[in-house]
Amino acid sequence: RHTTRSHYQRMKEIKVGLLGLGTVGSGVFEVLKNNADEISRRSGCRIRVTRVVSRGLDAVRKMVGPDIAISEDPFDIVNDPAIDVLVEVMGGTTVARDVVLAAIAKGKQVVTANKALLAVHGNEIFAKAREQGVMVAFEAAVAGGIPIVKALREGLAANRIDMLAGIINGTTNFILSEMRDKGLSFDAALADAQRLGYAEADPTFDIEGIDAAHKATLLASIAFGVPVQFDGAYIEGISKLAAEDFTYADQLGYRIKLLGIARRRAEGIELRVHPTLIPARRLLANVEGAMNAVWVKGDAVGETLYYGPGAGKLPTASAVVADLVDVARQIEVAPESRVPYLAFQQDQLQQVPVLPASEMETAYYLRIPVRDEPGVLADITRIMADEGVSIDAMLQRQPSEGANTTDIILMTHRTVEKCIDIASRRIEALPSVTAAPVRLR
């Protein structure tokens, strides 16, 4: 029996080039350093960062020590023949794309946390990687520390996935939790999130649903075996939500969450991100603050839920390093024997269309501001019936003292978006309706 020391002396080494030493990059460096022995025991080799590319070389040198090559040119990693794996945690879709494609062309393995890069350029990147026989691992690109990519790609491989729905952006979930718990306006809750570091100075990607749509796009591809189709996603953010909608949702037994949803239908795939009413009793409705959760329904397993931190230095680094361990385990495996990038064998990916927003099928919440006059409700319900929309529940608030306006809240049964579009336009045109109906799915 060999001693541990002699075992480590013979152990193979995987050399890593780390592109980006911000929040996630520094976390990756820290996890690899702190858990080196545990990682080696799992992977069967030493995984060592030998080159770091980042801005601010003095700060980089202070963090990584004297033994690691540092520079500011991303292509230094590409051009270093000793590097086995590029870890891209820089972000963006321009330089990152060029560097990743160049690394693949040189036969380097790639680990990335960049959901925007893969949602926009994933088909191109996966095709080039397949030609070169290299891996592209991206667990950290979706839901931070939650191993949802591995769960969909491997753990649920026996299933036909019917649908998934996820709270996959921590910033928006924190804002929505604040709006519900404290009765804050959207602007006040966003200011809180920025002050506490949950939201960027420019929060557009988060609050308008774009970040969640990048992640939902990747999950849909893995779940259904289709190419990445970000351009087809329907995206609606949270900036137009009002405090009263949280009050009404509570009264009706619902919570409002920003969900990324992918649903398989006979005609194609629904791929959508929008504020969503979830029954309060469901686990997904009770995911609060900056936490993430993804609900997945498979035909064999039924409903499963994956919960955890969706961002942050060490949770995201946990996923990046797990990908590095996977790469180390499979680096000498024949490319055709590895787990496919999008879960399905490449020649089995199906060109299934993403359905247009008008064909979405769901139930709806409508808040209709009206003058408190006789016959208003009858006019509204007649329009809904004309358009084939069935009403499930109704709430009518008493007008405030001295006011002559109020809200009518309607909950519909499942219907098609285009029917609600027509009904909403007709309702808005009624003389007694004072503003466009607010619509939530």
Image (tube, rainbow, N blue to C red):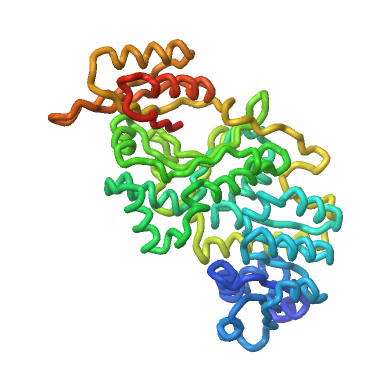
Say which residue appears at 72% left-offset and 51% top-offset: 122
Percent coordinates x, y for residue 298 in the rendering:
60, 33
* Furthest residue toward bottom: 66
Q: Is 98 positioned to the left or the right of 141 in the image?
A: right
Q: Is residue 53 above or below residue 417?
A: below
Percent coordinates x, y for residue 13 in the rendering:
75, 74
Say which residue appears at 63% left-offset and 26% top-offset: 265
Q: How many numbered discs, if any?
A: 0
Q: Is 298 positioned to the left or the right of 99 in the image?
A: left
Percent coordinates x, y for residue 348 in the rendering:
80, 37
- Front-lying residue, 273 or 145: 273
Instruction: Tell me, yes or no, if residue 236 can be seen here.
Output: yes
Q: Is 42 positioned to the left or the right of 423 in the image?
A: right
Task: Name the quadrant containing residue 234.
Answer: top right
Say which residue appears at 49% left-offset and 47% top-offset: 208
- Front-lying residue, 194 or 103: 194
- Front-lying residue, 309 or 389: 389
Q: Is residue 258 above or below residue 351?
A: below
Say which residue appears at 66% left-offset and 70% top-offset: 19
Task: Name the quadrant containing residue 26.
Answer: bottom right
Percent coordinates x, y for residue 187 in the rendering:
35, 51
Instruction: Tell me, yes or no, if residue 295 can be seen here.
Output: no
Q: Is residue 225 above or below residue 52?
A: above
Image quarter hosting the N terminus: bottom right
* Furthest residue toward left: 401
Task: Name the quadrant containing residue 374.
Answer: top left
